[in-house]
Image: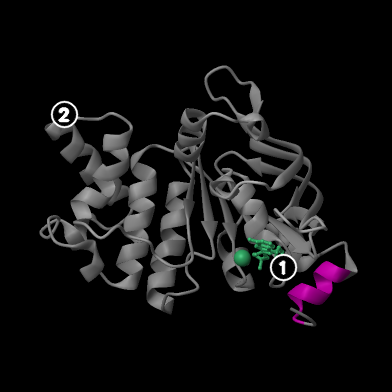
Amino acid sequence: MQVMNIKKFSFTYHGVEHPSLRDITLPIKKNKITALIGPSGCGKSTLLRSMNRIHDLYPGNKYDGKIELLNQVNGSMQNILDIKKENEFIELRQRVGMIFQKPTPFPMSTFDNVAYGLKISGLKNKTELADRVEQALKDGALWKEVHDRLGKSAMGLSGGQQQRLCIARAVAVKPEVLLFDEPTSALDPISTGAIEELLVELKKDISICIVTHNMQQASRISDYTAFMYLGDLVEYDKTENIFLNPKENRTEDYITGRFG
Ligand code: ADP
Ligand code: MG
């Protein structure tokens, strides 16, 4: 089952003549990890940032085609490119959360980082808030390391811990989809391993799309892989097929390290 459906999607940045993405069609499957791979500048981040309209923090970009999001209550698909109202954007970004390359904790305590989004979504009861923060930190595989220092600044955590805090913060508001843009490229191998394990655990509840330039990472953790090149989606398939038996020459050249 598909939780998002990208259909004949093109994207042009404000003030730029040519589209950065052309005619992309890609499903995001429910409770699976989909990896986006391809050389630098091929449009991976642009596509990911379209999937929760985070581009719209800057106006004037041009979208064509559709990006549909499953309504898990009634089974219908909503085209998120139709969204115009501020409250709908807030709801979209709760349902489709994003984690960036550099950990982005807020300059406040670990507890408040996770409580922040919950408070915005209207949760006021102190006990319930504490319970939800604890659960989110457990879901982010961080609780054991921070439970005795919840009130201390999150800026004192290591890079890997900060990234897991960002994941906990996103998970706290119960998203349906999480988008990760090279979430481990600033981390050491041990922290990277912890995040990879976490993603595989999270997909039981959340559908995941991850941009990675690390092909070992894509083949370790993803179920499906899309190879992009110069704004086009060249090939999409089960991850094992992309890495063991690609159909397109350009895919094979990239995964065998002939360019990129
Ligand atoms: P990737 O994540 O695969 O490295 P990007 O999505 O960042 O690629 O970039 C795709 C293309 O869009 C590149 O040609 C890049 O120069 C261009 N681009 C990215 N961000 C902007 C922007 N804010 N304004 C104009 N062009 C941009
Ligand atoms: Mg990028």
Q: What is the magenta segment's predominant secondary structure?
A: helix
Pick the quarter of the image with the N terminus: top right
- Residue 105 image-quadrant placement: bottom left
Beta carbon at label 1 within 8 Å of ligand 1: yes
Residue located beneath label 2 in the image: 125
Q: Is residue 1 visible?
A: no
Give the label on residue 38, or none.
1
Report the side of 86 relative to 2 (left or right). left
Q: Is residue 225 visible?
A: yes
Marks 2/1: CA–CA distance = 45 Å
| Percent position of residue 42, x then y | 74, 65
- In the image, is residue 252 part of the stretch drawn in magenta? yes
Amino acid carrying label 2: it is Asn
Report the side of 140 relative to 28 (left or right). left
- In the image, is residue 146 part of the stretch drawn in magenta? no
Question: Could you tell me if the residues under marks 2 and 1 are in contact, i.e. CB atoms within 8 Å?
Answer: no
Residue at point 61% right, 21% down? 75
Among numbered discs 2 and 1, the one appearing first in the sequence:
1
| Percent position of residue 117, x then y | 32, 41
Callout 2 secondary element: loop
For the residue pair 167 and 21, the one nearer the viewer reads as 21
| Percent position of residue 248, x then y | 88, 64
Report the side of 20 relative to 76 (left or right). right
Residue at point 63% right, 33% down? 80
From this view, report whether residue 79 is shown above or below residue 9: above
Amino acid carrying label 1: it is Gly
Pick the quarter of the image with the C terminus: bottom right
